[in-house]
Image (cartoon, helix red, strand yellow):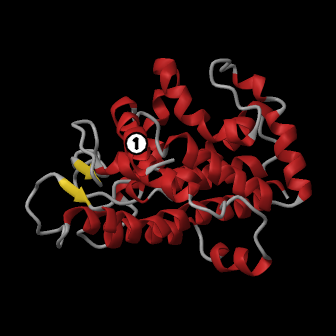
Amino acid sequence: MSRILLLLATLIGLGAATPAAAYWEYGHQTVAAIAYRNVTPQVRARIDALLARQGLLETPTCPARTIEEASVWADCIKTLGPRFSYAYSWHYQNIDVCAPFDLKPPCRDGNCVSAQIERDVKLLKDRSVPLRERVQALAFLVHFVGDLHQPLHAGDHHDLGGNQVKTNYGLFTSKRLNLHAVWDGYLAERAISTPPSPVRQYSAAERAALWTGNVEDWSRENWEVARDYAYPAAAGADMCTAAARPAQLSEAAIEKLVPVARQQVVRGGLRLARLLDEALG
């Protein structure tokens, strides 16, 4: 595609996009696909067996027949009204990037993404839990690990994780475009689609390098990505003292962020694989 056609296609995409889904479909499905390729064969079979019973969820408009479908189920059920409204706050944790890291306030009563990841692992491990609850825990877990590794679900600056930060993305501007949407969709899609594909079988050494730590450690790491990359690149200055204004992500800034965003997807996929092996192995 010529540069002119590419620019036109991107402009059309910006105008038509409706960024309602966390991390959008491409990011979540890629995290899920990486995990599926890197769990043990026995765990892969158990994932398939659980998802074969996804009818128990009674959400026909939000199927979870495959791990890729399951990865976006938690966003799809937002369209079902009050039935799942209790889960809205489970997709993120607002931790101020201009203050010391503290997971306790946003996770009060377990209403944050990291607490729900730990809860879902426990539910999957417990074979005495009703099957419907284990299927639901699997769908939530696959989604929430993806959410945690979108850095603006882990870090915040009193702006709803960048949702209130109007942002220009390269040459393009839109009244609906914000920093959160950039990381949810446009930057993630560019990072994932940049060859080679991140969906592959990773070596034991590659997996071990990213599997260390626990969910709280990963929360801190993703908060640091928001603090050290996402916000400063948009502010073009010390974002904790910069005056409020529309952010501008230049093409040079985007190029520097692509490997960061790609690494987040790989981290999410491999860590999800570890949690699934622990829960279902």
Q: Residues within 10 Å of mark 1 (few under 14, many from 20)?
A: some
Q: Position of residue 198 (x, y in %)?
A: 66, 62
Residue 115 versus residue 238 in the image, above or below: above
Residue shown at 33% from the left, 32% from the top: 15
Residue 97 in sight from this viewpoint: no
Residue shown at 38% from the left, 34% from the top: 12
Q: Amino acid at mark 1?
A: Thr
Residue shown at 62% from the left, 42% from the top: 140
Q: Position of residue 191 (x, y in %)?
A: 51, 59
Residue shown at 19% from the left, 68% from the top: 236
Q: Residue furthest left?
A: 243
Residue 62 in sight from this viewpoint: yes
Q: Position of residue 93 (x, y in %)?
A: 40, 53
In the rendered view, does 239 fall on the left or right side of 116? left
- Marks counted in the figure total 1
Q: Position of residue 100 (x, y in %)?
A: 29, 73
Secondary structure of the residue carrying numbered label 1: helix
Which image quarter holds the C terminus?
Answer: bottom right
* Residue under numbered circle 1: 10
Residue 38, quarter of the rendered image: bottom right
Residue 19, quarter of the rendered image: top left
Residue nearest the observer in this picture, 140 or 107:
140
Residue 182 versus residue 217 in the image, above or below: above
Residue 35, quarter of the rendered image: bottom right
Residue nearest the observer in this picture, 114 or 168:
168
